[in-house]
Each structure stands twice: as C-alpha cells, then as structure tokens.
C-alpha cells in the first residue's frame, strides 16, 4: 500500500532525469538538463544565460499559497472558536455545513464565484448602490484569485482548528482571566499555543494543495501570470518537455518536504522541552 | 443488508442481459459528436458506446504517449495527426480502401498530414480567429490589427485562449512570419507584439469563452468559427471577424490508436458517420464545416446564415513544428506569462 503511494513519485523522479523525446514523451537515460533549465536557458541571443523566469513563477506560487494559508487562518480561528462554543447538536450541524462545499465539484464552486464577482453579478451590483460605476467587474485580478482560493481551501483549516479548540480546557482560559490576562493576552499566550497542533495541520492541509492550484488563477485571475501548476502542465503538453516538467514537480516536492520536516523537527523539540 | 445484496444481484443480471455485443470507446473533443448519432449507431450495430472528451490536442497526445489508453477512436487535428503517425501511436487501418474515403471532398484527400490516407478519415474543419460582442464593439473587424494592437474601444476588453499554438499562430499571421519559425529574431518579434498586447488583455483562458464574451465581460475573444456560429444561433450578439491577414486553420480526423481493443467497431463507426445523411446530422450538431459529402438540402448552416464557416480570407493550417521551433513557441509563452 505504502509502495503504491510512493511509486508514482519515483516514476516522476525517473522522468525528470530522462532524456527528452522530440515530440513529448521521454527515453530512459540520465540527463540533468531538466534541472539546469530551471535556472539556465538559451537566451534570445543564442547564449546560455541565467533566467529568473521560472524562479519568479515558483516564488509567486509559494507566495500565493502562503497568503491563502494566512487568510484562511485569520478567518478560520474565530469561526472554529464560535462553532466550538455552540451546544452539542448545533455543533455537529455547523461542522457539517463547513464541509458542505466539498460535496460540489470544484469547477462549479469557481464558476459560482465568477458569477458573484463578474459583470452584472451580485457583488458589483451591491457596490453600485454605493456609487460604483455600472458594468464594473471584480474579476481578473489577484483579489479574485485569492477569494476563490480562500473559499476553496478554508474548510481544510476550520476542521482541524475546531478539533483542537474543542479539546481546549475552559478552566485554563478562566485561570488566564483570573491572573489579569486580557482577551488579547489570553489568545496569544493560552489559546494559540494550545491549539498550535491544529493550526499547524490546518496550515499544511491548505498550503500544500494551494501550491498546485491551476483553476483559480486562470479562471478568476485571468491567467495573466503563470503558476507552477500551469507551468508543469505546459511542459507536459504544448511544451513537449516531460523531463523539465517532472524536474519542476520534483523541485517543488523537495521544497515542500524540507518545510514539513523542519516543522516536524521543531514541534518534536518543543514537546521534548515540555 | 440482504435487500441491498439481492438488489445488486438483480441489477447485475439485468446489466448483463442488457449488455450489447461489442464495445466502442471514443476519445474525442468534448461535445463534438452528435449524441443522436451515438444513439443510432449503438442501436443499429448493437454496440455499447462510451464517449470521453478532451479539450486540447496536447491532452490526447499525452494520453496516447503514456500508452494503453483503451480507446478505439480519437480525433486529433492535422498537426498532431502528423506527429502521431511519425511516433507510431496510431494504426494504419487502410482508410483509403473504405467507402468513407470516397466521401471525402477532393481538396481534403491525401494531404501532408496523411499523404496516403491510410491512417485517418477527416471529420470536421474550421478556423480560429477573434469574435466580437457587437453590443460592446461596433468598430471594424477586418484586420488582426484591431485585436493585437487594440485602440481605446477594445483596450482592456479582450481575452485570449490559453493555448500557445493558436495564439502564437495568429500573431505570426499578423506579422507575416511563417508558422513554426526557427528564427529566434522572428519569434522575439512575436513576443514583443504579445507583450504590448498583454496590458489590454483581461484574461488568457480557454474555458467559459461564451459566458465571458456574450455577457460583455470582454468585448472581443479569440475563438473558433463553429462555436461563434452556435452561440449566435442561441441569440448571443457575437460576430466572427474575417481578418484579411487570414485565419488559423484546423481539421480533425478520426484515427484508431495503436492496440485499440475494438478496432472493427471503430472502422464500422467511421463508415457510419461518413454517410451523407449522418455527416449532415453531425455538421448540423457540431456547427463546424464537414470535409465529407453532405446532403445540401438538409444543411442547417449555409453561406447566408453562417458566413463564418465559409471564409473568403486565406486559411492557413497549423503545422507540426520541429522541436526547435516548438521550444521557441514555449519560450515566448512562458516569457509572456512569467
């Protein structure tokens, strides 16, 4: 079972060092051109030169995923806290409601946002009441991309945060107040440290899939700036350069792995101290 | 629980009873084959037909290259058909021996993508250009200039496809640069044109084109002839631009992937869809021109009501580029969207 999960990654790894087929595909062999291509390419003058374009795309993708994660966190903590404070039966209904969007295809959810933000949609019309120009659209910008991204991934943040807030011992919060800790101090020094495991797993659950987002940047953001997902797709499709596509995917995987390992080591150390 | 088991058992029995003699698995452009023809074929030949769709030639090529697709029929465009023959991904089924071959219009027989016509029977052809929403834009559309170097009334209100091949092909037509150029200087000019255009482009997307254009979200959109004809038929205020520099052409043909499990049924289907009656039904559904003989009297789209399908400007078929030329295309595209 574990082997079946790992096998595709090994194949992608093997493709990333294979030699490239003329019309896509690949031949088994050993060739590191794919990895070199991430930084060095033939320029328009015909000489090999340092190219930042792929690094820019990689950086932009990580930034988008990070902002999505932070926004999800900021929105999810109060929601999770509120759900946890509800009586039992209402709690389970609310948790169910949080998972509800997952029952619908992701494409449909994005299309729904296109209608909400698009020309003549509810939101531009509402803003029109306050003097926004008629026929305005809120589509095709980074804000639109982020709105759809946060909406898509926020349940993955709410659920683990809710789980750890629910386990929180209420007497500790009372104790904090007894010791003259105001709301902010209580949040910062009691609630956040105790819910850190939930926040960490929520952050990973949101960040990792957000790195591969393709639909939202294209449909909502207008696809004017490439993301990692579409870059890899381009290399396997129109670019007909499978080893390069695989090399980008493996590089991304390595970055994610390093980040996750660092987080794991840090939390293991913290537990040892306690 | 027992009930569930017996229900399943009964369903399985009926399932087997109802199962047809043979199977046929199509992998074609999404929503490209008339459903009534699938139904008709399925009944006439007692074959269980399943249809999967793709939205780009690259998807199809990648799937066939990955091997053992399990599909019996596919419909690549001419330049990808050429690659598939060269890469030995499709079967030589002696297409020129079939009745379907005689139904092909002379000008589409034995072209460079299948010189001896052993591998393919063409199904539909058309072009890619730009369409405008006539409620948003009433200016001239007779040149690619209005699209690539938009003036104030189109600036910021145009959208492109997210497929480099069509977009760059059109830019090459406009600049008078041959398709598949291997000259970096020429391709740099293509990049410069597209970069200058980019600030006026609202979106690069191949999805939801009809919604974006007919709602007025954008005033002009790169699109395909038949889709414009269909949208116009549904009442959308759209018009296909006849640009004097020409249009990017394509022709899709039915082919049989190597190792297709139901090759005989695939050939039966090709013969079936190539009869004048069925070819007419197919054209009326798909709204793209038919390279096969059709019943003129039953044609839904004529020169009068669908001029987009009968262009009088030159139509240049996209070519299958050499790896060097394709790399330049990819480089232009990546730098455009970096």
Image (cartoon, coloured by chain):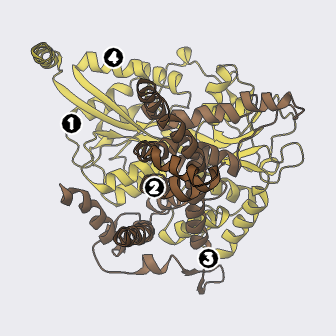
Chain colours: A brown, B yellow
Q: Is residue A96 above or below residue A26?
A: above
Q: Which class describes the residues within 10 Å of circle 3: few (<14), some (14-19), or many (20+)?
A: some
Say left or right for A26 vs B286: left
Q: Nearer the viewer, mark 2 or mark 4?
A: 2
Write down the residue under mark 1.
Answer: B262
Q: Who's the residue at 81% across and 51% down the image?
A: B145
Q: Residue at x 72, y 60 (%)?
A: B194
Residue under mark 1: which chain is it in?
A: B
- Residue B224, placed above or below residue A271: above
Q: Report the disc number at residue A52.
A: 3
Tell me, yes or no, whether dots 1 and 4 are on the same chain.
yes
**Labels 3, 4: front one:** 3
Tell me the CA gap for discs 1 and 4. 18 Å
* C-alpha separation, residue under disc 2 versus residue under disc 3: 41 Å
Location of the C terminus of chain A (image quadrant): bottom left
Disc marking residue A194:
2
In terms of depth relative to the viewer, which is nearer, B57 or A202?
A: A202
Q: Where is residue A22 drawn, in percent x and y?
A: 41, 69
Q: Which chain does tag 3 point to?
A: A
Q: CA distance from mark 3 to mark 1?
A: 49 Å
Element on which disc 4 rests: helix
Q: Are marks 1 and 4 in contact (CB under 8 Å)?
A: no
Query: Residue B187 has which mark?
Result: none
Q: Where residue B262 appears, x then y in whole percent?
A: 21, 36
**Of discs 2 and 3, which sits in the foreground?**
2
């Amino acid at each position: 079972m574990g082997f079946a999960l790992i096998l595709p990654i090994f194949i992608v790894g093997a493709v990333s060092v294979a030699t490239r087929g003329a019309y896509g595909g690949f031949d088994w062999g050993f060739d590191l051109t794919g990895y070199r291509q991430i930084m060095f390419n033939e320029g328009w003058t015909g000489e090999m030169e340092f190219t930042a374009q792929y690094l820019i795309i990689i950086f932009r993708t990580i930034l988008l995923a990070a902002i999505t994660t932070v926004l999800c966190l900021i929105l999810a903590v109060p929601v999770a806290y509120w759900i946890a404070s509800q009586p039992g039966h209402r709690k389970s209904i609310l948790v169910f409601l949080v998972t509800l969007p997952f029952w619908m295809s992701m494409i449909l959810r994005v299309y729904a946002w296109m209608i909400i933000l698009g020309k003549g949609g509810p939101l531009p019309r509402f803003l029109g009441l306050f003097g926004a120009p008629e026929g305005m659209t809120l589509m095709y910008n980074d804000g639109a991309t982020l709105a759809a991204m946060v909406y898509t991934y926020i349940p993955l943040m709410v659920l683990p945060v809710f789980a750890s807030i629910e386990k929180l011992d209420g007497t500790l919060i009372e104790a904090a107040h007894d010791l003259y800790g105001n709301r902010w101090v209580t949040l910062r020094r009691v609630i956040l440290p105790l819910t850190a495991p939930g926040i960490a797993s929520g952050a990973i659950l949101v960040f990792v899939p957000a790195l591969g987002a393709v639909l939202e940047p294209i449909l909502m953001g207008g696809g004017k700036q490439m993301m990692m997902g579409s870059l890899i797709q381009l290399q396997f499709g129109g670019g007909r350069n499978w080893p390069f596509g695989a090399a980008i995917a493996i590089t991304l995987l390595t970055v994610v792995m390093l980040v996750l390992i660092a987080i794991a080591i840090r939390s293991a150390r913290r537990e040892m101290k306690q | 629980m027992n009930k569930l088991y017996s229900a399943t058992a009964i369903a399985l029995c009926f399932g087997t009873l109802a199962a047809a003699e043979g199977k046929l698995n199509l992998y074609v452009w999404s929503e490209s084959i008339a459903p009534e023809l699938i139904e008709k074929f399925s009944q006439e030949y007692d074959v269980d037909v399943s249809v999967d769709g793709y939205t780009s030639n690259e998807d199809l090529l990648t799937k066939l290259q990955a091997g053992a697709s399990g599909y019996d029929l596919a419909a690549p465009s001419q330049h990808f058909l050429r690659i598939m023959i060269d890469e030995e991904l499709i079967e030589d089924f002696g297409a020129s021996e079939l009745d379907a071959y005689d139904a092909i219009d002379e000008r589409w027989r034995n072209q460079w993508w299948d010189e001896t016509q052993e591998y393919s029977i063409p199904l539909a052809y058309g072009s890619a250009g730009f369409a405008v929403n006539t409620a948003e834009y009433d200016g001239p559309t007779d040149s690619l200039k209005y699209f690539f170097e938009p003036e104030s009334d189109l600036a910021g209100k145009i959208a492109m496809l997210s497929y480099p091949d069509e977009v760059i092909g059109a830019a090459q037509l406009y600049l008078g640069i041959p398709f598949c150029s291997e000259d970096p200087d020429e391709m740099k000019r293509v990049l410069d044109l597209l970069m200058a255009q980019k600030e006026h482009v609202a979106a690069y997307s191949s999805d939801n084109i009809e919604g974006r254009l007919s709602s007025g979200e954008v005033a002009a959109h790169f699109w395909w002839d038949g889709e414009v004809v269909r949208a116009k038929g549904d009442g959308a205020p759209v018009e296909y631009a006849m640009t004097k520099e020409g249009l990017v052409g394509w022709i899709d043909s039915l082919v049989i992937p190597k190792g297709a499990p139901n090759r005989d049924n695939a050939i039966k289907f090709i013969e079936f869809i190539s009869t004048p009656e069925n070819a007419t039904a197919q054209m009326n559904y798909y709204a793209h021109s038919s390279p096969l003989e059709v019943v003129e009297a039953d044609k839904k789209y004529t020169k009068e009501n669908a001029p987009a399908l009968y262009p009088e400007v030159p139509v240049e078929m996209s070519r299958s580029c050499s790896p060097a030329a394709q790399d330049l295309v990819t480089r232009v595209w990546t730098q455009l969207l970096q």
